Amino acid sequence: MHLPLMGFGGQRFSVEHLVEYVEVATSLGLDAVAVNDHMVFEVPWLDGPTALAAVVSCSGTAQLFTTVSNPVVRGPVALAKILAGLDVLSGGRLVAGLGPGSSERDYASVGIAFEERWPRFDESVMAIRALLRGESFAGRYYEITGPLEPLPTRPGGPPLWIGSWGSAVGLRRAVRLGDGWLASAYNTTPQRFEIGWNHVQRAIQGTRPDTTAFGNGLATMWFHIDDRRAGNVLEGVLAPAVHRPVEELRERLPFGSADAVAERLDAFRAAGVQRVFLWPVTDEVEQLHRFAGEVLPRLDA
């Protein structure tokens, strides 16, 4: 599950709410906690790594994911320190999803040209991997003398998954730089994901000793289970916040009855998705209960 970082209206940003949310989710069988990244957005957005650190001690054995963090906007040194700290505090449960984002406003907020995001991102990922291994790094944009200590719990640092909406260039980048691929639920379909995943599987052949260790996930799977209200939540809450056409979101995201939500998730599972990061829109704790009670049994049937 994604932590509820977005202020959709009436949002209660507090440690108590985050802890309750995580404890409910893990008690219901969800096994990972995820956060993503924006500096500025159309609605209030609680800082992801800060929120993730706040729930480390109540997350049990759940894996911790960034889905994704932006190393260009945050800076590779600062982000490497954050990731190492999260991995140490969690006892080695972190998977670091990284991506350059698509928001020009985020780049403008830190004085970096949006047009430089791709070369800076490639170099940032290489710098972060070196720093998490206790090494130094020198490149075109960044030069850092390591080690940055304390180092992560796991030798070599946490796995790095690369975010991509599924373009051929983006998938090649994920294979070249990463240990996994993170897709975006509201920017893909089961058919497009399957095509992308098949491309990745072909591309990783011969590139590493164990190709089965290269994972995938589907982030930002916003959902709302309710026969009557789901349409209103999609149209009146989510669509205005993310500035996407309602029909496009309706085609891609699971809003509606439990049967409809299960059908949408089953289609992604058939397409090869290994892990889905759920994000309830409004009534977060209630929606987690409904998902576990009404949708999971249909998926396990």
Image: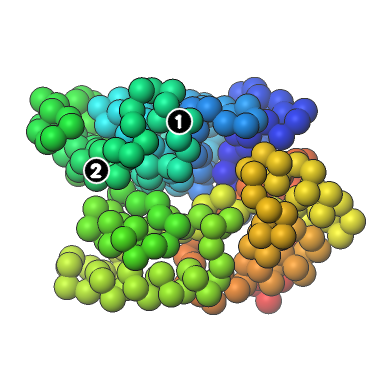
* Drawn side of residue 142 relative to residue 236, left or right: left
Q: How many marks?
A: 2
Does label 1 or label 2 sit earlier along the sequence?
Answer: 1
Query: Would residue 279 be visible to someone looking at this image?
Result: yes
**Residue at x-position 79% and y-position 60%:** 256
* Drawn side of residue 230 relative to residue 144, left or right: right
SS for dot 2: helix
**Residue at x-position 75% and y-position 42%:** 237
Name the residue carrying label 1: 106
Query: Would residue 64 be visible to someone looking at this image?
Result: no
Residue 32 screen position, x and y as percent: 51, 48
Q: Amino acid at mark 1?
A: Asp
**Dot 2: within a 10 Å radius of its alpha carbon, few (fewer than 14), some, or many (20 or more) residues?**
few
Name the residue carrying label 2: 119
Q: Amino acid at mark 2?
A: Pro
**Residue at x-position 86% and y-position 51%:** 229
